[in-house]
């Protein structure tokens, strides 16, 4: 069964708008004009002026959570959990989304070839890879979005689902901001990463919606895990 036209239109609009935004930011970053020249240096300067010991400790913790090693391990655990709770289709979808995220990180970096902020801005060791987009931001946002789309619905209570979604969204934002705060990325690098993550997750959401509406499909989701009411007199 096809996904509702409204959902398809929404996903298509989100993907198209996100990709257009990434192209705009990538062109600016490559040509060193537009947002790259008008906004990024000032945001970096503001981040430096706002630094304090507590904020630096929090930023370093957030950037650790968003690192390749941590996200990679968590993604593997997510795939295992999905395989057990929702079946192989959703597990493979999550693996594919993370693979696309990692591939885009490497590919777009090489295409744009933007250098990172200088040593006067950076807090930490030198990273000689290119800056656009932020791998920490993109990969962690995709991972956290997958949790929201594929695992959070298994929670029985609406209040729990809302709280979990808000916490995960704040974590994704915090990881991105930590990369600017620590001086490893420009602001437009992080914004582009969020846009790419939105495109990936929109496609994943659409594919998932189509799958659950497929005739004969049985989804091991939260709906069929709620205990039946006790009708014993």
Image: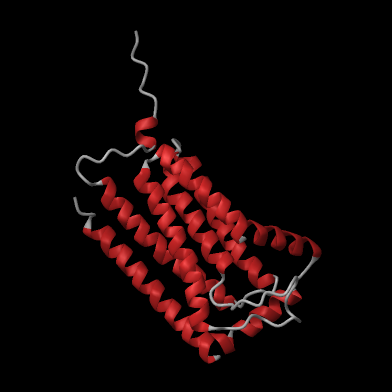
**On screen, residue 230 above or below 2:** above
Quadrant hosting residue 24 = bottom left
Q: Nearer the viewer, residue 233 or 25?
A: 25
Q: Residue 39: x, y in percent?
A: 59, 84
Which residue: 22% across, 46% down? 214
The answer to whether 212 appears left or right of 38 in the picture is left
Residue drawn 59% across the image and 78% down it: 130
Vertical arrangement, residue 106 with respect to residue 141, above or below: below
How far across and down, in percent of the image, does residue 102 sit? 49, 65
Let me know if residue 49 appears in the view: yes
Q: Give residue 116's quadrant in the image.
A: bottom right
Is 225 situated left or right of 44 in this image?
Answer: left
| Colouring style | secondary structure
Q: Which quadrant of the figure has residue 134? A: bottom right
Do we see residue 34 in this rendering?
no
Q: Is residue 90 above or below residue 134?
A: above
- For this rendering, which residue is in front, 42 or 123? 123
Q: Check the image and report above or below for 54 versus 163.
A: below
Point 36% across, 68% down: residue: 15
Residue that extends furthest to the right in the rendered view of this protein: 53
Q: Nearer the viewer, residue 187 or 97?
A: 97
Q: How many labels sit on residues? A: 0
**Residue 18: percent from the left, percent from the top?**
41, 72
Q: Position of residue 206 (x, y in %)?
A: 31, 57
Q: Residue furthest top?
A: 233
Location of the C terminus by quadrant is top left
């Amino acid at each position: 069964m096809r996904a509702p036209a409204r959902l398809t239109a929404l996903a298509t609009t989100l993907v198209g708008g996100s990709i257009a935004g990434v192209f705009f930011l990538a062109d600016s970053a490559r040509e060193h004009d537009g947002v790259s020249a008008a906004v990024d240096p000032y945001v970096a300067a503001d981040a430096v002026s706002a630094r304090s010991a507590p904020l630096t400790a929090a930023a370093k913790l957030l950037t650790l959570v968003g690192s390749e090693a941590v996200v990679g391990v968590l993604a593997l655990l997510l795939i295992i959990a999905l395989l057990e709770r929702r079946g192989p289709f959703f597990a493979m979808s999550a693996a594919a989304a993370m693979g696309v995220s990692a591939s885009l990180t490497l590919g777009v970096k090489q295409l744009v070839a933007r250098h990172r902020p200088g040593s006067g801005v950076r807090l930490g060791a030198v990273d000689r890879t290119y800056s656009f987009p932020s791998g920490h931001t993109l990969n962690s946002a995709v991972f956290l979005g997958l949790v929201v789309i594929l695992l959070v619905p298994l929670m029985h209570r609406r209040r729990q689902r809302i709280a979990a979604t808000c916490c995960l969204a704040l974590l994704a934002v915090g990881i991105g901001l930590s990369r600017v705060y620590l001086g490893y990325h420009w602001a437009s690098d992080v914004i582009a990463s969020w846009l790419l993550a939105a495109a990936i997750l929109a496609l994943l959401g659409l594919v998932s919606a189509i799958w659950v509406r497929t005739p004969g499909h049985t989804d091991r989701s939260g709906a069929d895990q709620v205990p039946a009411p006790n009708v014993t007199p």
